[in-house]
Image (cartoon, rainbow, N blue to C red):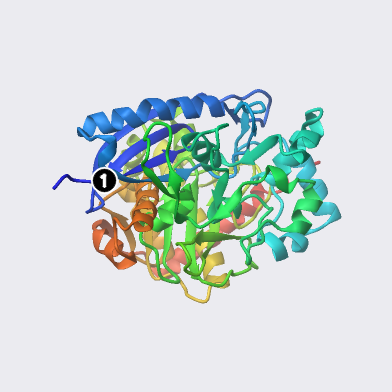
Amino acid sequence: MVERYVLSIDQGTTSTRCILFDHQGRLVSVAQREHQQYFTQPGWVEHDATEIWANLGRIVPRALENAGVGPGQVAAIGIANQRETTVLWDRRTGVPIGNAITWQDTRTDALVDELRRTTGDDFFLDRCGLSPTTYFSAPRIRWLFDHVDGLRERAERGEVLFGTVESWLIWNLTGGPDGGLHITDATNASRTMLMNIRTLSWDEELLGYFGVPRAMLPEIRPSAERYGVARALLPDVRIGAALGDQQAALFGQTCFAMGEAKCTYGTGSFLLMNTGTDPVRSRHGLLTTVGYKIGDEPTVYALEGPIAVTGSLVQWFRDRLGLIHSAPEIETLARTVEDNGGCYIVPAFSGLFAPHWRSDARGVVVGLTSYITKGHLARAVLEATGWQTREVIDAMNADSPEPLKALKVDGGMTANNLLMQFVADVLDVPVVRPMVSETVSLGAAYAAGLAVGYWPDLEGLRRNWHRAGQWMPTMDPARREAEYENWRRAVERSLGWMRS
């Protein structure tokens, strides 16, 4: 019998990866290609959507070739994508309207400030579960309408399409201008500020508020469903799933029960907790989002706490301060001392995300004395990630009916054993890392495989999950709380540095 595989497309912020997985959820082959970052003005971050599509055309054949697999052995395609990044393109020609505006872009800050000042958060929280920030897609569409002549009118006539990156890829995979499917999934739609969080449909009041014509919007579909078949790159292969990257990681970590949570530690970090089939409105600075929706089954919701700066703080320590030559060296340097020596670093380089949402914050180093060495600074860098995780988990425990019992982790920073032990210590719960570290790609593959029957059910996916590492809390409770209080005092000193 010929072996079959599921192909996962992980379209991320800096690169696109194509990974083949087998029935055991094992990585069989991977191909990857980076794309250019465009920083055209301060605070502006853009991608070329055409380049991303072209890169996919290069890496799909390479991934198959590396595994010695033909297209006929691919059971399904699943897609995970950088969320909130906004692509507009011409329906007739397939040519993007300028560059894609990424989730990191802050050009809409003045517009967002105006929204919050004139309308307040509750109007949005009641409908889409999100407070206005530069993070989400709808303000970007509104900005483009305000700055590109004739664009709104073209969108109203149905000549211009909007999508996050998975919509752009699916449209091109299924024919592009020649009948391509214009769809999105509920997880990505929930990040636009345009979808009603309860009905999973475009909300008329939100569309009217932002002035977004329904004619330009994709159809909202479940995260796992047989969307159609590819006509490009992998002809006749079924496309079975699309999820935003962090929801894909939640799924890949098999966080299928209420109260289960994962944190992906990368440049920034993203912590999601499964809250079951009812959306939980956060009262403590978190985002209410769709976790996943499998076919006709009830929607599963999540609380999310994004942390802006974690791995990028290590990069700053390496590249800007020159205190280490490579990222792994920070653990060795931090182990030259027993503690942080009373030093704390709050990495609010461009404000603080969850649970504070303070764009006026800027980074601070507090507690400096002549005793402090670069070893203490290295510890403070790592501990900043632990304390930011603790802040988000405290907010989740306050909002969620189920308190956290263990945290599943993935991402590049999980290779740092000192950091993972510190996270376990400050959370006072076990921290667990899986055998397969590519959880975003795996989650997209799992969802696509479920849609086409490659895997039978969620329990089968759970059986594929295997622990590679675990850290148990060992910190004295009195020390934990004293250190946490010091951290909170440091955060207070980071606030209010940028004045409007």
Q: Nearer the viewer, residue 417 or 24?
A: 24
Whether residue 360 is visible: no
Q: Where does residue 31 sit, x and y in percent of width and height? A: 32, 31
Q: In the figure, 286 relative to 62: above or below? A: below
Q: Where does residue 69 sit, x and y in percent of width and height? A: 22, 35
Residue that protrudes farthest toward the front in the picture: 178
Residue 30 located left or right of residue 305? left
Q: Residue at x 38, y 57 (%)?
A: 451
**For residue 120, which quarter of the picture?**
bottom right
What residue is pinned by disc 1? 5
Quarter that holds the C terminus: top right
Residue that protrudes farthest toward the right in the picture: 118
Residue that protrudes farthest toward the left in the picture: 1
Q: Nearer the viewer, residue 275 or 141?
A: 141
Residue 333 located left or right of residue 216? left
Identify the element where label 1 is drawn.
strand
Q: Where does residue 459 sit, x and y in percent of width and height? A: 30, 67
Q: Residue at x 47, y 54 (%)?
A: 247
Q: Residue at x 40, y 40 (%)?
A: 9
Q: In the figure, 281 relative to 209: above or below? A: below
Q: Residue at x 49, y 33 (%)?
A: 316
Residue 103 located left or right of residue 62? right
Kind of residue indicated by mark 1: Tyr
**For residue 149, which quarter of the picture?**
top right
Q: Nearer the viewer, residue 161 or 56?
A: 161
Q: Where does residue 143 sit, x and y in percent of width and height? A: 76, 37
Q: In the figure, 377 relative to 473: above or below? A: above
Q: In the figure, 212 relative to 18: above or below? A: below
